[in-house]
Amino acid sequence: MNNEQKHILFLPRWYPHQFDPMFGLFIKKHAEAVSLYNRISVLYIQGINSKEDFKKKQTFESPNLFTQIYYYRISANKLWNVVRFWFYLIIGYLLIQKKKGKPDLVHVHILTRLGIFALILKWIYKTPYIITEHWSRYLPETNSYKGWLRKKLGKIVVRKAKAILPVSKALADAMKNHGLLNMNYQIIPNVVEDIFYEPLNKSANNHPIVFLHVSTFEDRSKNISGILRVIKQLSETRLDFEFWFVGDGIDFEAMKNYSMTLKIPTEVIRFYGIRQGKDLANIYHQADYLVMFSNYETFLVVINEAQACGLPVVCTRVGELSQLINETNGFLIEPRNEKQLESTLNNILINKPSFNASEIQKKAKKEYRYDAVSQRLNTIYRS
């Protein structure tokens, strides 16, 4: 195998930026992972609704990772937004090519427009491209992958790619059901940072039991309102638990207000807001269970983070989760079944089931560490 570093151009549709440091963070972690063995350039364009002044351009550089971000103010004229998006794609690519050289490979994260750009680069420069997909819109539960032209172009872009790398088998199957066919589908999970793999030192007599929910606070998919109703029901008969909520998003304030409307006792519920890095890892290590009550999912990186911290998981039987969670590492429940969620949490509080935290963490290390994911992607890059 040729061990010379390749120059990989990342084209992500989601990526952390000055207005949202959590947006597409899992893609940034992919970029950091593969920069262990390759030179990575990231080109990202973000439309902004804010009327305040903002930086139109940001450049970041660290060893083996160069990031170029452009911003434009979103207009009521949709065509003008499209024109500016493509303008920044072109000038950003030319800037990266001038500074870092012609890419050996383009790695698209999320279809469709960036896949079209990668296809154009292939026609002009003979540069191959691969696609990683994260979006749940292909799943039958969401039914949001629509548009005749989008689907037509998507099929062409996927067929011409060297590889398609969805983050879960459920997402791969859903994409194929939409006619997005390619001979080289491979499942590559998201990355969990090394800070989560701290040694386990939780007390066996940890009281009260702490349930943890970490998400982007979008109720339509995460069903946080359902969790709150279950907490309310539990709190009417017992108060020997705490429920911590971590994250931020479009429904964060609405969910906080809903918890007050339900009159959930303040001693059992806590909203942390955004926590990142070491702060987030510490919260995982203090908790006893991760609880996710999603209506649909493609892949939940928070489950991998929890497992890296040795936490068992309570989650719904959706997407890839039914293959990830079993009797050795947690409990599966049916989506939207609030009675089943309440019964499961109540059973945990009464019987305090035992899980092997060290084994849960050991398996996560093998699958989700930077080096594990980086080596798998590096093998694909070099093939």
Image: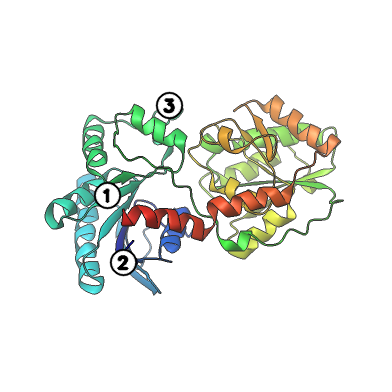
Mark closer to the chain start, 3 or 1: 1
Q: Position of residue 219 (x, y in %)?
A: 55, 38
Q: Quadrant of the N terminus?
A: bottom left
Residue under numbered circle 2: 56
Whether residue 76 is visible to the viewer of this picture, yes or no, is: no
Q: Quadrant of residue 278?
A: bottom right
168 is higher (above) or lower (below) than 202: above
Q: Which residue is mark 3?
A: 140
Which amino acid is tagged 2?
Lys
Front position among marks 2 and 1: 1
Q: Residue at x 58, y 56 (%)?
A: 274
- Residue depicted at x 18% and y 52%: 122
Q: Residues within 10 Å of mark 2 (few under 14, many from 20)?
A: few
> Residue 355: x, y in percent?
75, 43
Reading the image, the residue beneath label 1 is: 114
Residue 7, quarter of the rendered image = bottom left
Q: Report if residue 221 is visible in the image.
A: yes
Q: Name the kind of residue labelled 3 in the image.
A: Pro
